[in-house]
Image (tube, rainbow, N blue to C red):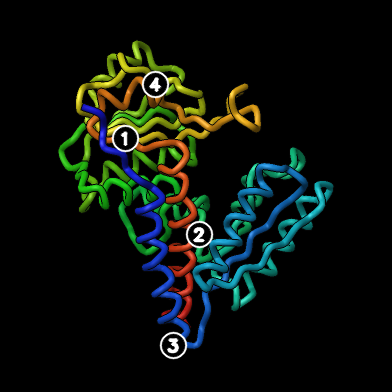
Amino acid sequence: MAAAIIDGNAISAIINGETATAVSELLTKHNVRPGLAVILIGENPASKVYVGRKVKKCEELGIFSKKIELPAETSEKDVIAVIDGLNKDPHIHGILVQFPPPAHISEKAVIDAIDPRKDVDCFHPVNIGKMLIGERDGFFPCTPYGVMLLLEKSGVNPAGKHVVVLGRSNIVGKPMMALMVQKAKGADATVTVCHSGTKDLKAFTRQADILVAAIGKPCFVKAEMVKEGAVVIDVGINKIADPSSKTGSRLVGDVDYDQVAPIASMITPVPGGVGPMTIAVLMQNTVKACKASIAAS
């Protein structure tokens, strides 16, 4: 039996609908529109596409967006000065710097410069720390929390299950572990994190009730690595050559979908799985930041 498809487009549409309603209520009750500033440094084509999608989603949901494009040669000091101005801007509730920045700009310096109350990407150490100890007044990282929402909306409860996360990045792997292991509704899982130093990887992945792949290797997870009936979440997005495609390439995940789908009970496709959830959570976090700003004023 083929796996049930976890439709990220459909689930993100539900989340976005809730966000649009919240934006409307903030305007009606407080005359305040949530605002998101997105900073793009340089001419990275992929970054331009991602920023464009975020700005478009803001427009669709009624969120004010401010796109700031800086030349690639902009100094780190000048980037931080721009962030400082946004930190002080009462119309901006969320700040996002599209990574990666040019090589001469430190990601850490940029992250540290953002006011934690406006850190809607959840990269700042303050928000990472709050997440780790189980506090919920900060922000959760967009992609890992998007995965949590996908599971929740699909009726998958991680409680008591063995979750295996492939990858230990600060963006997905580590926060995914932190969210899954919390003593909280929709979490409470036993979590194993595997990475490039893991020996006998298959021995771990075959134990997974829920397998989350986030390693950036196209079609890496094969059928023999997956337990029958597992829920498989594919966070990867990789472009590979495909002569049969009009563009000469196509997008695939970290999971070999054709091999794994017949074995899994549920699976996310690529594209159309985790990806749409990342932007949905970003919008959700921006509204959360706006509400916190109003409460604090």
Compute the Cα span from label 4 to label 2: 31 Å
Q: Is mark 3 on a helix, strand or loop?
A: helix
Quarter of the figure with the N terminus:
top left
Residue at x 41%, y 26% (from the top left corner): 255
Query: From where the camera sits, is residue 188 visible?
Result: no
Q: What element carries label 2?
A: loop
Q: Mark 1 belongs to which amino acid?
A: Ile
Q: Are marks 4 and 2 in contact (CB under 8 Å)?
A: no
Q: Nearer the viewer, mark 3 or mark 1?
A: 1
Q: Mark 2 belongs to which amino acid?
A: Val
Residue at x 30%, y 53% (from the top left corner): 134
Residue beneath label 1, please?
267
Compute the Cα span from label 3 to label 1: 40 Å
Q: Pointer 1: residues within 10 angstroms few (<14), some, or many (20+)?
A: many
Upstream in sequence: badge 1 or badge 4: 4
For residue 189, side relative to residue 23 (left or right): left
Q: Nearer the viewer, mark 1 or mark 2?
A: 1
Upstream in sequence: badge 2 or badge 3: 3
Badge number at residue 120: 2
Upstream in sequence: badge 1 or badge 2: 2
Residue at x 20%, y 48% (from the top left corner): 155
Residue at x 72%, y 61% (from the top left corner): 68
Judge whether 188 appears above or below 220 on screen.
below
Compute the Cα span from label 3 to label 4: 48 Å
Q: What element carries label 1?
A: strand
Compute the Cα span from label 1 to label 4: 12 Å
Residue beneath label 4, please?
221
The image position of residue 286, as x and y in percent, is: 49, 66
Residue beneath label 3, please?
28
Badge number at residue 128: none
Q: Mark 4 belongs to which amino acid?
A: Val
